Amino acid sequence: MKLKKLIPRSLFGRFLLIIAVPALIVQLVSIYVFFYVYVDVISKHMARSVVSEMSFIKSSVNNPLRQYILHDFAKNIEINFSFEERHHFKKKSKIADSDWKRSKIYQYINLFPLIDPLNRFKSELENYKLTPYEIYENPENNAFFIVKVQMSDGIISFDVPVKRITSSSKYVFILWMLLTGLITSFISIIFLKNQLRPISALSKAAEKFGRGQNVPNFRPTGSREIRSVAISFIKMKERIARQIAQRTDMLSSVSHDLRTPLTRMKLQLELAKDPEELIDLKQDISDMEKLIAEYLDFARHEEREKAKSVILKEFLQEKIINYYRKMHQTIDAKINIADNYQMPLKKLAFKRAIINLIDNAFNYGDHVTLQASLSNNNLMLIIDDNGPGIPENERGNVLKPFYRIDNSRNLDKKSSPRTERGGSGLGLAIAMDAITSHGGQMKLGESPAGGLRVLIYIPV
């Protein structure tokens, strides 16, 4: 479980991990093999060569037969030496290495033999019995370091060239490995981004289509597998759009055919006398017309309407709050949105959804509140009323088309003066359909005022 938490969640991060981990392992193995096989062997031979020459000089310092060739020999091998009689190391003296080598952590770092470039040299000094010794940095010339070896009658000091102990090829190799690693990683990142771009485009197209927005310019790109998925998405989108269009056309035709006999019935009623028994018939015809109008609204669900950017606060104020103010109905509105904030909306569908919900609230209550705010990249709308509410077990059913409950919120028993008789049971379904077409969600709950609460979330 802990390992899963370390794995990146994004596809780009996982692809990068798949490439980076093997590349890092290859580089570490290469560096390990290079150092412990190549560098170690070279360092060993270089150190042995220098220490053997130092050993020869040490053994020849007090030999009169070798004195005449000793300085010429040292000059040729580029190792200067000097001898100090009757001198001993101070008990508390320290090897004059750099600051980081004098720190406490160095004793742990020094456990790794190849981190310290003088490790092989020190080993050879001990093998050739050039002990005790001390190694110092040369403050006058960085190209040399000083090695002092204790003898029975004094101390012999050597100026050893750094280039004869350490090889610069290892640094070139490390630089080459790091540089090529960075270049290949950069190329891999560019390649991965190009490969993931079609997936991102497909994701955005699917999200737009899920919100009910049109995706006109989407076309398959990328690798063969991604193109196959994109083609399947396009076919699915066309199939769904065709089914919706067929449903809309069929329902529109049925509704149109129903309007024709209704119109004739209304004409006959107008020409006939107006006895008491015809009043209910006129009311039934009026209800049928409303039913057909709502049915058409539900069937169309504003499929052809395109989302356009609107100033949200201004839209809610003018199209919703002012609309009810003209109808002499007051909404207690709390809009916590910046004045210039814009978001894409299908204006007609969104307005119809909110008006249907507020109409429903006014039908069963006399106090309605509307709250609007932005939260977690969502537009959140809350509509509350003080009516009788809807039982919890019925809240899912009332969102279904034509469903009506036989209780205090029965749509055939509305008390609002704006409606003459009951509705069709499509009001909440139309609102739900419009909110879903924006990629949002609508939930019903219990209002703090005692009635129904409608919560709407639309991604911005």
Image (cartoon, rainbow, N blue to C red):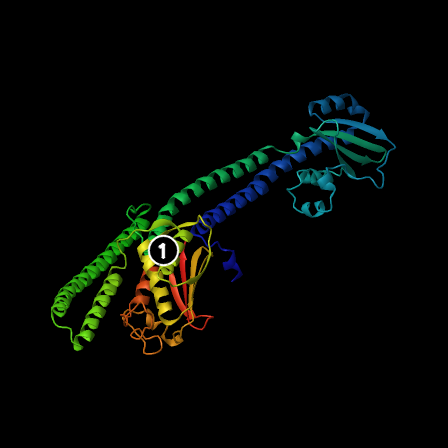
Counting other residues with Cα less than 10 Å from the Cα at mark 1, is it few (<14), some (14-19), or many (20 or more)?
some
Q: How many labels, in total?
A: 1
Residue 307 screen position, x and y as percent: 33, 51
Q: Is residue 31 visible?
A: yes
- Left or right: 94 with respect to 241? right
SS at badge 1: helix
- Left or right: 315 with respect to 272? right
Q: Is residue 63 above or below residue 396?
A: above
Instruction: Give the residue pinned by disc 1.
Output: 319
Q: Is residue 437 visible?
A: no
Residue 101 screen position, x and y as percent: 72, 41
Q: Residue at x 38, y 74 (%)?
A: 390
Tell which of 309 and 241 is nearer to you.
309
Tell which of 363 and 295 is nearer to you.
363
Residue type (three-letter) at the residue carrying disc 1: Lys
Q: Dividing the picture into quarters, in which one does residue 114 lie?
A: top right
Q: Residue at x 78, y 28 (%)?
A: 60
